Image: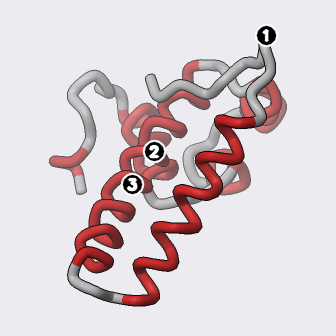
Amino acid sequence: MEDTIPQQYVTDQEKAVYIAGYLGFGVEYLVKCVQLDRKKILQQFFEEEGTEYNIWLHGNYVAQTELRKTIMESALNSSSPNIEKMLQYFAATDDEINNIEVGTNLRVCP
């Protein structure tokens, strides 16, 4: 797994936060296993900004992208469950895009 961590993350803590996001772990994991300050990380997740939050989000988005690629490849090979899953992803994205209001803070992958 170490070879999948982007080079910009150099400290052990940055790497652990990225891996936590990549594997889909949440705040409790970050507090208990990575030993981040509970108040600080909760504030970052609430505000959807901050160094650790952005690293976690980057890992999470990379994993989601890889999974969606795999599901899409399967869907293109006529896997009915995966075709349905991709349609759900696209519908959710359409909903998100169609409900954007001016001045809304959007999450952007770092």
Q: Which residue is mark 3?
A: 63
Please say if the residues under marks 1 and 2 sit with CB atoms less than 8 Å apart: no
Q: Residue at x 22, y 49 (%)?
A: 2
Q: Amino acid at mark 3?
A: Ala
Q: Residue at x 60, y 31 (%)?
A: 53
Q: Amino acid at mark 2?
A: Tyr
Q: How many marks?
A: 3
Q: Which quarter of the image is occupied by the C terminus?
A: top left
| Residue 83 found in image quarter | bottom left
Q: Is residue 54 left or right of residue 80?
A: right
Q: Which quarter of the image is occupied by the N terminus?
A: bottom left
Q: Which residue is mark 1?
A: 103
Q: Disc 3 on helix, strand or loop?
A: helix
In the image, which disc is placed on residue 61?
2
Residue 93 vertical position relative to residue 8 in the rendered view, above or below = below
For label 2, the crowd category at 10 Å Cα-Cα, with few meaning under 14, some 14 to 19 and many 20 or more, is: some
Q: Is residue 89 left or right of residue 44?
A: left
Name the mark nearer the viewer: 3 or 1. 1
